[in-house]
Every structure is written in structure tokens, then in C-alpha cells.
Image (cartoon, rainbow, N blue to C red):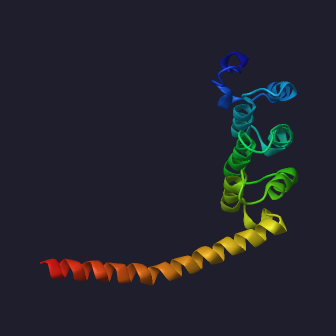
Amino acid sequence: MTSDWNWETGEGLLGMDDPAEVDAALDRNDDSLGAAVIGLALNCPPEVVSPRIIRALELLPPGRGRDFPFTATAHLARLDGRLTPELYEALRAEGLGGAADHAIDDTLSFVPFRDLPVWLKRRWVYVTVRETLLRWWLRPLEAVGEAWRALRERRRT
């Protein structure tokens, strides 16, 4: 399948299923490394992908391109419903407000609560309570808005 991967353009790398090929890309710090790691996450279990994601995070400086390994982590959470302890630690180290935001959200959505580490369980409770309260708060406001719209429509006719 190697012939389907074009490292210069990145074409075909989302179909990556060869960890050795990704290891070679990590060794040469390839420009298309992010796409290859995402492809590996789409096609391999977390135990195979996790060390490569961690290594990619070590190679990529903060900023542009660093979101690719976290996107791979999000895909693992979505597809497998589990992450490795190393990936949980990488999410915690990156924290909220950065490249890991979507990966943390997907982890909270797709990994069973019982399998989350304590820090993510606390985050899950916070997010769930906040969103529930927000829904309760917005329901009456929406009703008032609809009543005003109906009143304005009635006045126009």
C-alpha cells in the first residue's frame, strides 16, 4: 500500500495503516507527519497510535501543525471509545484553550465516564451542569422572545 502514500503532497496519508512508515516520518520530521498520524489513528488501535502521537507532540512546536496530533487523539476517542494513559496526560498537559480543546470535548463525548481519569470526570461534571443550567435559563428567554414576536405580528395585522 506504500505506493498510495505521497509524502510530498500528503495525498493518501489519511489511509495510513503502517506504523513503521509513520516512525520513519517521525525520524525525518516530515512536513506531512500530521496527516499520517491522523490516518494511523483512523486505521489502528490506540495502543499502536499513542506512542506516535506523543512523539509527534514532542517534535511539533506550539502553534501551527500541533493540532494534528490532537485531531488524531479525538479520532481515537470517537472510533475506539478509549485512550491510553499517555494520551490523557498529553491532553492534561496541553489544557483547555489550546490545540487540545476539540480532543478533550470528543473524549468527554465518546469515552465512557467510568473510563475517564479524575481530572476529566471533574470537567465532564462541570460541562454537564453548565449546559443544563444554560438550557434551563434559555428556555424562558426563548418563550419571551416568541411572545414578543407574536405580539409584533399581531400589531402589524
Which one is in front, 46 or 107? 107
Give the image quarter of residue 49: top right
Percent coordinates x, y for residue 145 in the rendering: 35, 79
x then y, percent, for residue 157 = 12, 78
Name the residue: 48% across, 78% down.
138
Task: In the displayed orientation, state which residue is furthest to the top.
Answer: 3
Please state which of residues 142 and 80 is positioned toward the viewer in this rendering. 142
Q: Position of residue 153 (x, y in %)?
A: 20, 77
Quadrant, the N terminus: top right
Residue 22 in the image: above or below residue 127: above
At x 66%, y 19%, the residue is 4
Question: Is 145 located above or below residue 123 in the figure?
Answer: below
Image-based side of 51 in relation to 68, left or right: right
Which of the 4 quarters of the picture holds residue 117?
Answer: bottom right
Q: Is residue 49 above or below residue 116?
A: above
Q: Is residue 95 left or right of residue 138?
A: right
Point out residue 10 in the picture as x, y percentages from the top left corner: 66, 25
Residue at (70, 38) in percent of width and height: 38
